[in-house]
Image (cartoon, grey):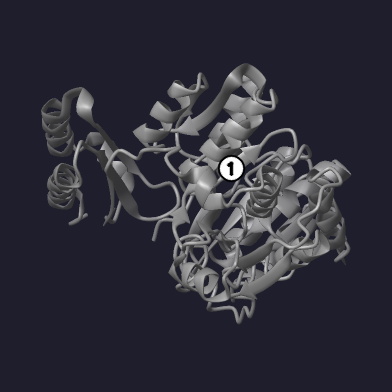
Amino acid sequence: MARPGFGTDGVRGVANVHLTAELATALGRAAVRVLGLPCVVVGRDTRQSSPMLQAALAAGMASEGADVVDLGVLPTAGVAFAAAQRGVPAAMVSASHNPYTDNGIKLFGANGIKLSPELEEWVEAELDNDRGTGAVGTLSTDLGTAADYRDHLVASLDGRRLDGLRVVVDCANGAAWEVAPAVLEALGAHVHAICVAPDGTNINASCGSTHPLRLAETVRATKSDLGLALDGDADRLVAVDHTGRVLDGDELLAIFAVDLAARDDLPGSAVVVTVMTNLGFRHAMAARGIEVHETPVGDRQVLVALDEKGLALGGEQSGHIVFRRRATTGDGILTGLLLADTVVRAGRPLADLADGLVERVPQVLVNVSVPDPARLADARSVWDQVAAVEAELGDRGRVLLRASGTEPLVRVMVEAPTPELAADAAGRLRAAVERSLAAG
């Protein structure tokens, strides 16, 4: 069985099948050899396999002479924060929004930014190298970073508070199950927290940012002002207004962009998005004089573009939003706090802020399970079908097919003038992918 390599967000696969303790150990050793790590901090989410994989990763790092500090359960952004604060590299054991059976490992540099694809390739190339330094590093635990990260989040509002705001937060039984409610409460919000009882197998299970129905029901039942849904490692967020309407990353990014522009605080009067962002978002920004820069999928890609262009705000439809002046990666808790702050400052409900802002072009997303997504690039019959659909849609719509970097899937996206046209086109593309790739 082929071992997993680095994708759009680290190494990811089925725990103890694809991503084994042996691979985690080898990855830890390779990372130290390539990056020359004297010290590294490591965090994890709440899934059953995370302690095992974290221990194996740490053992590999220590066996190459690195001193490894266990941060315990902490959101991905908290681990990145610790790396930047201490000036040391970091690793996060998590498969983000995937089911508990999966797991992953993400590596960060001493600046708190995810490793570049070039460095990841170098680390991957070292996996089979058995040479060692003979040095032995130390293993220690420091659970105080969670408190430092909480203080950092509270400080993000620059002294403003959320007193009286009624918020439901869905922590997805994941890494933010303690810190997210605590931060909201420290800022004065009335908090109703759900999915805060992780048992190792219920992370992301019918909850969190990929399953916001329960959150919407709870917001309505408790007559709350808004709801915030995180994923398993809390690097993404979707929101719910007081009516129960779900707002995805496109709509949240639009709210932030308009608010910052109105306060003359949007550098370059521009935002960064990925190819998955709905055409309706682009139309909304154009109508308000805000430029849109597009990147491939992944919050790492968004961050690179932000830094290259000197911009401050970017994000993905999935809910990864990067506030570059405040973070080095997507941070769902930070996004939720800044959204709540926007509502309080505006003195208007979230529903009002979102109403009519993004007129979404009908979009259909389809995930097609395939044994080897990388074969999509050479699937001539699939691309012939894509060309046919694009010719039919012309400038009235858009088609995107891509191999997932985190799961064995081909992702199909179609935007069209009507939901029916989008669904029909997506169905034809799905059938083409299945005929060409599903059999392996």
Rendered location of residue 390, percent (x, y):
17, 29
Q: From what the image shows, is residue 51 above or below residue 289?
A: below
Front residue of this view, candidates 274 and 106? 274
Left or right, 7 with respect to 73, comes to left
Q: Residue at x 63, y 56 (%)?
A: 26
Q: Amino acid at mark 1?
A: Ile
Which quarter of the rendering shows the N terminus?
A: bottom left
Q: Nearer the viewer, residue 370 or 368?
A: 368
Q: Name which quarter of the figure residue 28 lies in.
A: bottom right
Residue wearing tag 1: 321
* Residue 149 vs residue 244, the one in the foreground: 244
Residue 100 appears in view: no
Residue sitting at 42 percent across and 34 percent down? 281
* Furthest residue in direction front, as rendered: 347
Pointer 1 local density, CA inside 10 Å: few below 14, some 14–19, many at least 20: many
The residue lying at 60 percent from left, 67 percent from top is 224
Tell me what residue is drawn at x 68 percent, y 60 percent: 57
